[in-house]
Structures are given as C-alpha cells and as structure tokens.
Amino acid sequence: MKKGKRYVEATKLVDRTNLYDVEDAVALVKKAASAKFDETIEAHIRLGVDGRHADQQVRGAVVLPHGTGKTVRVLVFAKGDKVDEAQAAGADYVGGEELIPRIQNEGWLDFDVVVATPDMMGVVGRLGRVLGPKGLMPNPKAGTVTMDVTKAVNDIKAGKIEYRLDKTNIIHVPVGKASFTEEQLADNFHTLIGAIIKAKPAAAKGQYLRSVVMTSTMGPGIKINTAKLS
C-alpha cells in the first residue's frame, strides 16, 4: 500500500528502533499529526495475558482527566424516576421498550455509549446482536449497568472511556486529540496505564505490558518504553 507524502514525512521524525519516554512520545505524536483535521491520539497496548481465559480478561473503564476531545452521545435505558434523572444529568436520549424496534429494525445508532438500569437489562438484552458486535452493550464492569445514572452520565460526558482486550490481546483506546497540550495527553495516558496496571489479573504470568504504541489517526506508531511504566 502506497503511503501518502505527509505520512512519509512524519515517519522521518520517528526512530523505529527506539523506545521513547512518554513525554518524548507525546511531543513526537503531536508533531507527526499534520492532517487538516484534529487527529485523535490513540494508545495501543499489548498485554501478556490470554483473553480466551476468563481469569485473564482485562476490562474496565477510567475517566481521563482531560476527556477525549470528542462529544459523546449517551443513550440511557430507564423507567420511572430514573428517566427524569437521566434527562437531568444530560443524557442525549432516554427511553425503554419503545426504542427496541427503532434500533433493531430501523438501524438507529446515533449514540456512542449505552447506559441501563439493572431492571432494564431484560429489554436491552434483546439488542445483544446489534449492540454486542459494536461494543455498545451495557456492562457492570464498565459502570454502564447501574442505578446511579447521574454518575454514569456525568462520568461519560467528562471523558470516561472503556478499555477491553481484542482477540489479539491488545487494548485500543483514544487518549485525546492532537490539539491537546503535551501535558494533557501525558496526563490522560498515565491515568489510562495506571488503570490497566491496576486491572492486572492474578492469573497473568510474565511480562504484563508487552508493548505500548502511541499514534495519531494518520501518523506513524511511536513505541513507548514499558520498563518505565510499571
């Protein structure tokens, strides 16, 4: 695949054989983000676990101190008083049973995160085939199945992100935008890594943080020195 001129120029900034400190990596990733839009800065973290085993799963959520730079649309499944509570907290959409056909049949997916009160999970469960593959299914571990919808919505709007292993035991998460300051990106990154280290399964053996790469949407990957993170 032919790489664009901008990408080729950006790769010249990066020494592929080097493992960078977080602060240096952040400075480089910002420099390499030269697209005409505000690129997302992502972290890709390969862990020394085997996610096929339940006792080695790594999944959770963390509130990034400076948010992600993205406006997050929240859908809350609730009933009774919780509907008013969700609306007051700033949820973009709130509803129940009546939303099922809209999502299932009309393909309505104008939301980024789904929150549900536990008593609504029977209803939401029927959307498993639609929401599951898109990573939108509410989950107690991520704090999206809860009676405290105010806290859930506030946290998400403040920059809460969910992290989980993919099939190759890598976690892919945004840590901000190229327009963020270096300090904001480093803060967000350290908060994320801290949460992932804390979530280390007892069954995990050997080196836990195998490799960590930071990249912008259109830029090259920058390898981070994992020895300085744990």
Image: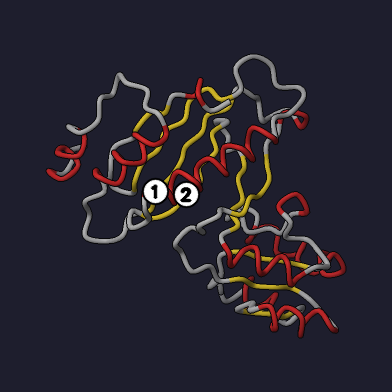
Q: What residue sits 15% from the left and 45% below the top?
A: 6
- Quadrant showing the C terminus: top right
- Quadrant showing the N terminus: top left
Is residue 141 rendered to the left or right of residue 38? right
Name the kind of residue labelled 2 in the image. Val
> Looking at this view, is 44 or 101 the one in front?
44
Where does label 1 land, which residue?
Answer: 41
Name the kind of residue labelled 1 in the image. Ile
**Residue 148, relative to residue 136: is it above or below?**
below
Image quadrant of residue 38? bottom left
- Residue occupying the far top of the picture: 206
User: Number of labelled discs?
Assistant: 2
Where does label 2 land, which residue?
Answer: 175
Is residue 212 rendered to the left or right of residue 39? right
Label located before the other in sequence (1 or 2): 1
> Looking at this view, is 114 or 181 the one in front?
181
Image coordinates of residue 5 in percent, x first then y, are 12, 43
Q: Secondary structure at mark 1?
A: strand
